[in-house]
Image (spheres, rainbow, N blue to C red):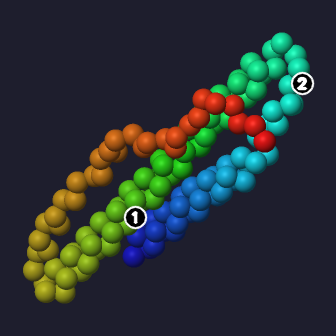
Amino acid sequence: MEVPTRLAELADTCLTASQAVADAWSDALTEIQVPSGAAGNTVAGGSVLSAHVEAADAAATGVGRLVAVLEADVDAVYLCAFDFSTTDETVARGLEEKKPAPAPERTPSPEPGPAPTPPPTSTRARVA
């Protein structure tokens, strides 16, 4: 039963990583906000602030997708651990009864499913 245990540990590691990424991004949001007067009264000030907001929104989308992929991996690895465990139990029961074990039911591999919906983004400049 070592393989299912190690797979469960791997799934737990993936879950911890997804939570760490989400928490780090959440903590960084306050640091990357730019005050409305940060660009001064220059001609390009509005463009600078707008570009900053667009970059932050793109980063939020990327981080959200990464978290979603890690969470989907957690589910897939747990399913694999369950399949290993179930197959081991089925074979063990067959050996105990001293008759051929029934062929294990084939569990289909999880489909990747639809792309995760990214968190809503704003095209308006964030100002503190």
Most extreme residue toward the top, as rendered?
43
**Residue type, label 1:** Tyr
Q: Would you say 82 lies left or right of 54 here? A: left
Q: Position of residue 97 (x, y in %)?
A: 13, 86
Above or below, comparing residue 43 to residue 73 in the picture: above
How would you rate the neighbour count of disc 1 (Cα within 10 Å): few for under 14, some for 14-19, many for 20 or more? some
Looking at this view, is 126 or 110 the one in front?
126
Q: What element does badge 1 sit on? A: helix
Q: Residue at left 76%, top 48%? A: 30
Name which residue lies at 16% across and 80% down: 94
- Numbered badge on residue 40: 2
Quadrant occupied by the C terminus? top right
Closer-to-camera residue (16/96) = 16
Disc 2 crowd, CA 10 A, few/some/many (<14, 14-19, 20+): few
Q: Position of residue 87 (x, y in %)?
A: 25, 70
Circle 1 residue: 78
Identify which amino acid the numbered label 2 is placed on: Gly
Residue drawn where x is 59% and y is 34% of the image: 122
Q: Quadrant of residue 82?
A: bottom left
Q: Is residue 5 left or right of residue 125?
A: left
Left or right: where 50 falls relative to 93: right
Q: Earlier in the sequence, mark 1 or mark 2?
A: 2
